[in-house]
Amino acid sequence: MNAQHLQFVPASEFRQRAAAAVADEHLRRSFRGAMDFLIGKRAAQFPDASALERQRALAEHIRKYSLARLPELLEQLERKLTENGVQVHWAESPEQANAIIIDIARRHGTKLMVKGKSMVSEEIELNHAMADAGMEALESDMGEYIVQLDGEKPSHIIMPAIHKTKEEIARLFAAKVPGASYTDSVDELIGIGRAVLREKFRTAEIGLSGVNFAVAETGTLCLVENEGNGRMCTTVPDVHVAITGIEKVVEKLEHVPPLFGLLTRSATGQAITTYFNMISGPRKPGEKDGPREVHLVLVDNGRTQAYADEQLRSTLQCIRCGACMNHCPVYTRIGGHAYGTTYPGPIGEIISPHMLGLAATHVLPTASSLCGACGEVCPVRIPIPDLLIRLRAEAQHDARPGHAPLLGQGAAKSRLADAVWSGWAALYTRPALYRAFGWLATRFRALTPPMQSGWTVSRTPLKPASRTLHDEMAARNKR
Amino acid sequence: MEGCGNRKYPEKPASVYFFGTCLIDLFCPEAGLDAVRLLEREGIEVHFPPDQTCCGQPAHSSGFPAQTRAVALAQLRLFPEPWPVIVPSGSCAGMMRHHYPKIFADDPRLLVEATALAERVYELSEFLSQVVRIRLIDHGEPTRVALHTSCAARREMGTHVHARTLLDQLPGVEVAVHAHESECCGFGGTFSLKHPPISSAMAGDKVDAIKETGAQTFVSADCGCLFNLNHTLRKREDRLQGQHLATFLWQRTGSEGGRQ
């Protein structure tokens, strides 16, 4: 299957999916409930607002510092990893990343790859590429396993199956897991999933994982997880392939704890996850376990476009906690699938245009009321609303002089919108004309159109008052 | 965020500028007049530059920077005296206070002017409570009121607390806290036109939450939110209507009452 095709998001389709989602009472209730739960869990972890601000400032500085030195840190990371016996690969595109991984898999005669949770592997549609190459890629994170079993994509970057109820999962397991009988006990369902996966861990030739932080100075790959499946994927099979975006590198080990602490508390409201894996190379002579080969695939996929622009670079500060979507009133109402991209919610709206181009994604940055809830909770202080506004502008205009065009630059250009806003500016920069407009609009308010585009779908029309404030103030001053 | 908590407030001035905002000008002049009346009752002379139009926010949030800049520039020099500029809207105040310096960042001369203006911009409830230190005398009947604070007031200006502080001065007013109070009402300027189903769902949920408190009315210091919620309620043929904070305060403290 073609990744680009899958992730193309025509404006009309996004609107249709969003409309269908808000009309779905069941989806609305379940997302609201789940997001409220996560918001509460996070809030309980941050009782002291000023302490949180200090931690956010530190995390932001670590991310900015790392990005400022990204080229040299990546080279240092490659050097250290190579010294540690890890094979480093660079992929500019999803196709290159898939080709690298498939090549490794084929060399090891792979029939089955077990996967820990990795959004970058979703981004490159690795599972489809593996299937096309005749190999199975099995998700082992319970949420990802459920979503894969049902032929879906994750609806949340941390909780992939959050859109599904217990009952839906029960029916899914009964229908799709060989030998499973229907149960809606959560513990029993997890037991069924684990029994399947246990066997798969033992037989898989390759384990794949994501990376949360790659430490340049030591060549350490840090992996944050709760279920232990990440540790299984990275230690049991003979070959471990880690995949991550080029932005995940930090310079020193001491830069990890502040980010890790904010990641888990922002994401799931946990002080720390059950597992924190630090991977520093393959099995050494005399060691009894661990993979014999470790690979790291560093994926660009549009990140260098964001990196090249001073303002857009902050997009890459993201540590993928998902707090922006948990707190987003739009995400809460339409869920993750409506976005049609790997990364939904506010972070998806600002990162997808770099991965897929503005031609495919220009509607996404408009799907925000700019309420600022995302920016308020972002642990690394990405100014998400400012970036949404910037992308709206880039989608509707040619590149400014001295700026390289973004992929799909100007894809949403509209002569009508240009004319409307230029007319608006002409009126609002001419005070006498503006006052005359106000006088006319108020005196002839009976002529106000009763249908006002999207406004009157669920609202009565806006109608000017009988006199403007300008009129009232002028009359007062005369008295 | 940047505006929250750490702003240093001056002594109460003798004169202020009033920036009425385009929404109040055309759709809700009463709110602007009531704000002016509240200020004048405190012995402050209110100057309304007649050439003012709009802060530029609609074009800014829609991604039209050239038009934003033109309209913002048309406001920049309307306030020559060093008086505070009072804005009866958290989002327009936020635009002038936090975005003007960014808009003119490429022109050092204009940047200096924009920064100097930004430093003098106050949202109305912020100015009344923190600079005027107004003491309100309540003449109204006991009532139950919900408060909707705009997202810009809450997250950009940090002034949501001031609206609450003012309401808390009124012994007859019980402020009912509604579910998901910090959540957006779904207005978002052109967002409400571009994504009607999502915007309507948000407005509907906000209205439901306010209704659930049993409040007799609700107030907001932002007309965008008020129009969004009031017109949603009218479409539902619901009689509940919100008021601008200035109007609510003026009506309860009365022209002849309050502080004389």
Image (cartoon, coloured by chain):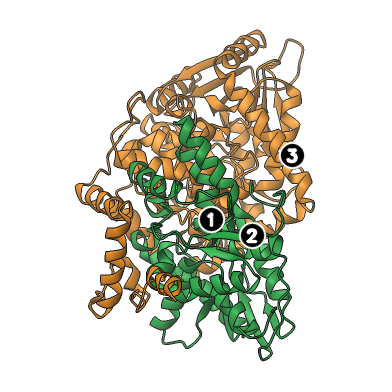
Chain colours: A orange, B green
| Quarter of the rendering occupied by the N terminus of chain A | top left
Mark count: 3
Residue pointed to by mark 3 = A55
The percent position of residue A397, horizontal first and vertical second, equals 29, 38
Question: Looking at the picture, does residue A79 appear above or below residue A426?
Answer: above
Q: Is residue B123 left or right of residue B235?
A: right
Q: Give the residue at x 46% y 57%.
A: A369
| Quarter of the rendering occupied by the C terminus of chain A | bottom left
Which quadrant holds residue A37?
bottom right
Q: Give the residue at x 39% y 58%.
A: B191
Q: Give the residue at x 41% y 57%.
A: B52
**Camera-side residue of A477 and A275:** A477
Question: Looking at the picture, does residue A124 appear above or below residue A340?
Answer: above
Q: Residue furthest front?
A: A479
Judging from the image, what secondary structure is the residue with disc 3 in? helix
**Camera-side residue of A3 and B123:** B123
Judging from the image, what secondary structure is the residue with disc 2 in? loop
| Callout in the foreground (3, 1) | 1
The percent position of residue A83, horizontal first and vertical second, equals 65, 8
Give the CA separation, mark 3 to mark 1: 29 Å
Q: Is residue B145 visible?
A: yes
Please report contact status of discs 1 and 2: CB closer than 8 Å, yes or no: yes
The percent position of residue A11, horizontal first and vertical second, equals 30, 51
The answer for which chain carries disc 3 is A
Q: The disc labelled 3 sits on which kind of residue?
A: Gln
**Camera-side residue of A112 and A55:** A55
The answer for which chain carries disc 2 is B
Q: Give the residue at x 35% y 49%.
A: A363
The percent position of residue A408, horizontal first and vertical second, equals 30, 35
